[in-house]
Image: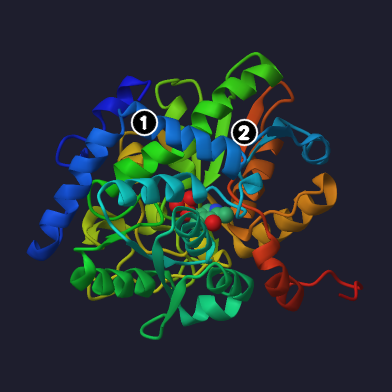
């Protein structure tokens, strides 16, 4: 990795400060140790790097551009807003950045199947795509609430040849899908690999997924110079687990004058169950095999969470996000459902870009931030995905007044 922060974080046991680590049943210790070993060998292998570069360029559609949002900037009347266009990845979001790499890794260690959870369905579609491309079996666990909300992605996964397993317990969203995928993985660990959908889970996943996503930041750094001959003053990304945010932050962590904002979903209020603003309201705790900041209920169990963005309603957060906030390197922004829907329509109508509802949280926060800054300042938003998966939900639940759909 071309910067020293990334080479020294996490430590060998997978800790970012006190966050991270690996809290797994003994039966999974060997499979995870094997993955760590394989990754440490592979990441510097010219063959692996070449294969990954090849698929990113000739299949996935990288590099993704940076677009200047001229009309949105004028509308806000302050800092210039730029967009890193992860929505233009094949399958519509940044997720393919780590899925292609995880499946190459799976192949390398002789696995024939990939297993994962999905929230909005983006990770499931990306993994099903990578599995199809590389010829592996694919099993995706998804909460029933998300299945109803994200129907197009469910259909896509099935068309791509994946097996979709509905999860019917608890809140029936992302957290339960992770539990279910983990349970299914345990007896299949000899021939399958669990491909986590974000910078979460036990070591080495937070590190591995961050490294695979860091392509966003390293591309963006070069591209932003083409626009402004400078670094961005501010970078804004939405945070669910934190992978798209870590992806863009990675290349700028050592550039201390660049402000890094992770935006959390405030949903419909600050009471438990109304939001998923983990870094804002959470406390230290272990969930899904790693120590981080989490939202807890009165019994110390993961709290119910909610956001209009299905990919960001998770009661924990990647350990590196918790660490970077703790040491003061990143700041946390908030955006509620109403602001996200407003940004969804604003970006669509002012820029011709329909964003994912998750990404709309970052856009909304950037709009608020732009208004507080001078016209000489810049904001780079990581537009993590496109909104086609959300269209049916939006027109049914938040239609435009006087427009007949
Ligand atoms: C999955 C997803 C997210 C949230 O995941 P992170 O790991 O926090 O990036 C954000 N935006 C889109 C479009 C997604 O699909």
Nearest to N terminus: mark 1 or mark 2: 1
Residue at 48% of width from left, 44% of height from top? 97
Q: Is residue 283 left or right of residue 137?
A: left
* Above or below, comparing residue 367 to residue 397 in the picture: above
Residue 292 visible from this viewpoint? yes
Q: Position of residue 282 (x, y in %)?
A: 33, 58
Q: Quadrant of residue 302?
A: bottom left
Residue at 61% of width from left, 46% of height from top? 89
Q: Mark number for residue 118?
A: none
Q: Residues within 10 Å of mark 2 (few under 14, many from 20)?
A: many
Residue at 22% of width from left, 48% of height from top? 35
Residue 259 visible from this viewpoint? no
Query: Which is more toward the observer, 372 or 69?
Result: 69
Q: Position of residue 10 (x, y in %)?
A: 24, 36
Quarter that holds the N terminus: top left
- Residue that sits furthest to the top in the current view: 229
Quarter that holds the C terminus: bottom right
Q: Residues within 10 Å of mark 1 (few under 14, many from 20)?
A: few
- Residue that sits furthest to the bottom in the current view: 168
Query: Which is more toward the observer, 216 or 249?
Result: 216
Q: Is residue 184 left or right of residue 71?
A: left
The answer to whether the beta carbon of the residue marked 1 is less than 8 Å from any atom of ligand 1 is no
Tag 2, which secondary structure? Answer: strand
Q: Mark number for residue 47?
A: 1
Q: How is the image coloured?
A: rainbow
Query: Which is more toward the observer, 50 or 239?
Result: 50
Q: Which residue was labeled with disc 2?
A: 380
């Amino acid at each position: 990795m071309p910067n020293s922060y990334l080479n020294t974080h996490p430590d060998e046991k997978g800790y970012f400060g006190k966050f991270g680590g690996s809290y797994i049943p003994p039966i999974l210790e060997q499979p995870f140790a094997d993955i760590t070993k394989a990754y440490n060998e592979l990441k510097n292998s010219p063959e692996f790097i070449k294969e990954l570069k090849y698929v990113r360029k000739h299949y996935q559609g990288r590099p993704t551009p940076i677009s200047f949002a001229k009309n949105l900037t004028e509308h806000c009347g302050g800092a210039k807003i730029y967009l890193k266009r992860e929505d233009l990845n094949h399958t519509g979001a940044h997720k393919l950045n780590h899925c292609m790499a995880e499946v190459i890794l799976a192949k390398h260690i002789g696995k024939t199947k990939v297993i994962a959870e999905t929230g909005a369905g983006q990770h499931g579609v990306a993994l099903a795509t990578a599995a199809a491309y590389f010829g592996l079996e694919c099993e995706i666990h998804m909460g029933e609430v998300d299945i109803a909300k994200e129907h197009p992605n469910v259909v896509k996964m099935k068309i791509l040849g994946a097996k979709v397993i509905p999860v019917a317990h608890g809140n029936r969203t992302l957290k339960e899908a992770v539990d279910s995928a983990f349970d299914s993985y345990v007896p299949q660990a000899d021939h399958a690999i669990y491909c986590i959908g974000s910078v979460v889970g036990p070591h080495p996943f937070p590190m591995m997924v961050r490294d695979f996503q860091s392509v966003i930041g390293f591309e963006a750094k070069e591209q932003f110079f083409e626009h402004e001959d400078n670094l961005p003053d501010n970078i804004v990304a939405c945070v669910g687990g934190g992978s798209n945010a870590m992806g863009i932050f990675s290349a700028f962590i050592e550039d201390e004058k660049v402000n890094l904002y992770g935006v959390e979903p405030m949903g419909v209020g600050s009471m438990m169950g109304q939001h998923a603003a983990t870094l804002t309201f959470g406390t230290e705790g272990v969930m899904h095999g790693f120590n981080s900041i989490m939202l807890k209920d009165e019994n110390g169990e993961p709290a119910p969470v909610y956001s209009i963005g299905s990919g960001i309603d998770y009661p924990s957060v990647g350990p590196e996000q918790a660490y970077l906030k703790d040491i003061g390197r990143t700041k946390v922004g908030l955006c509620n459902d109403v602001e996200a829907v407003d940004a969804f329509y604003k970006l669509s109508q002012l820029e011709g870009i329909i964003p994912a509802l998750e990404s709309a949280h970052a856009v909304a926060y950037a709009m608020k931030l732009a208004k507080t800054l001078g016209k000489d300042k810049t904001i780079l938003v990581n537009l993590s995905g496109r909104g086609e998966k959300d269209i049916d939900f939006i027109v049914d639940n938040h239609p435009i007044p006087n427009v007949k759909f």
